[in-house]
Image (cartoon, grey):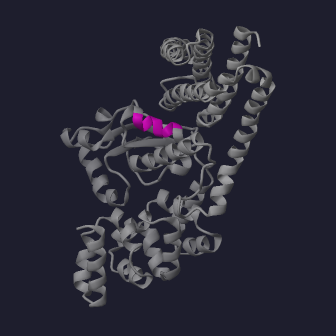
Amino acid sequence: MDLENIVEELTNLIENKKISKLHKFLENINSPDFPSILENIDEEKVIIVYRLLSKEKAAEVFVELEHDSQEKLISYLTDSEIKNVMNELYMDDAVDLIEEMPSNVVKRILANTKPQNRKIINELLKYPDETAGTLMTTEFIDLKENMTVDQAFEVIKKKGLKKETVYNCYVLSIDRKLLGVVDIKALLVADREKLVKEIMDTNVIKAYTLEDQEEVTKMFEKYDAVAIPVVDKEERLVGIITIDDAIDVMQEETLEDFEKMAAIMPAEDTYFKTSVFTHAKNRIVWLLVLMISAMITGAIIENFESAIASLPLLVSFIPMIMGTGGNCGSQSSTLIIRGLATDEIKTKDILKAMWKEFRVAILVGIGLAIVNTARIIIQYKDVKIAFAVSITLIFTVILAKLLGCILPILAKKLKLDPAIMASPLLTTVADTISVLLFFVISSMIFNL
């Protein structure tokens, strides 16, 4: 059933007060589908729908909602309803909620949260932003190494329902140091009397609480993990990060990189929820920088005014040369940024990458030069201009590709985001250099 039909059916059931049928209908809708459904019905109907959900489903749906929708919903809920939601939320979701809410809403949420959960939330909020500590949840299954498989299953049955995942169980010492990990499959196929320490994997892939969240998400990609344990500096297990949270971070980081590559300051909210003023503010800074840098290109052209006056035909080749330089730089920077993001390229590989891009540039530059030489000789029958344009193209391609290689790696070395060195910043730099090269080479060939 598509969204339009679901909304229509919901509306009919509410208006006809068929509560029992409505309750069954709601339970068959997947939680991630609710945000788009609730956006298309009246507010009073939203409250009716939400209050008919089971406790577990209500918490799942609440997590899926956008932060402004969560805030609005909280304003309608009673204290007991908020308490039910907070009791069902996993700790990482509770922290995310509190971080995004205004202070008056936060006070109400915390007032309706169990004291032990409130203490955990406050501990998690102390970790610096964008670290593993802020991303983790404290709900995991922990076992002791001297437990039998049977005893381990008893722990999983008793505690598993309230934990975020039971697929990986973590083996801890008396002082909660991480000794190993055992997955549910290993437990299922093992002899029931076997000890956990005999089947656990002691080579544990783990993250540290202050580790950057982007680095942690790379671990998920590298090791195909569904969960990664997080330990403190004493190697004590304090939480785990699950794959769903890692994917959210990957999406956020990718979007941020796209915005930076387009010379836009990253936005806090979605496109339509970001105000016109904020959109303008996020874009104008880089546009001013690029506009000022483009003035340098204009100054170079002005400086060679006499050369242009002597041979006006030169001006017609400027857009082609500038465009080629910018495109070549963008190609290289895109591949280098991708390599840096996936850890294929390290900052120490700068010379190796430069050598590779130089060889690529030679082949590309010669290919473009041959095509342009043939075109100019056929069209203008002027070998000197063909030579000037072709030589400029070769040098432009080489320099643009080397810049596209060097600048992102240099940014990474300086602890900056390599994406800021992508187009259009790189294009502007390549434009300036290509124009300067063109006029210098043309002046030498034509004695201008």
Q: Quadrant of residue 288?
A: top right
Residue 216 in view (yes/no): yes
Judge from the rendering whether residue 294 lies leftward or rightward of residue 358; answer left or right.
right
Picture coordinates of residue 46, whole percent (x, y): 40, 79
Residue 175 in view (yes/no): no
At horizontal 36% and vertical 68% (from top left) the residue drawn is 34
Q: Is residue 383 above or below residue 259?
A: above
Q: Point out the image quarter for the N terminus.
A: bottom left
344 or 300, nearer to the observer: 300
At horizontal 76% and vertical 36% (from top left) the residue drawn is 295
Q: Residue furthest bottom?
A: 16
The mark tally for this picture is: 0
For the record, the magenta segment spans: 215-221
Q: Is residue 212 above or below residue 388?
A: below
Picture coordinates of residue 407, whole percent (x, y): 64, 26
Picture coordinates of residue 300, whole percent (x, y): 77, 27
Dominant secondary structure (helix, strand or loop) of the stretch shown in magenta:
helix
Q: Is residue 36 above or below residue 343?
A: below
27 or 329, nearer to the observer: 329
Q: Quadrant of residue 199?
A: top left
Judge from the rendering whether residue 65 lies leftward or rightward of residue 348; answer left or right.
left
At horizontal 46% and vertical 80% (from top left) the residue drawn is 80
217 falls in the magenta region: yes
Q: Is residue 419 above or below residue 86?
A: above
Q: Point out the image quarter for the C terminus.
A: top right
195 falls in the magenta region: no
Picture coordinates of residue 251, whole percent (x, y): 46, 47
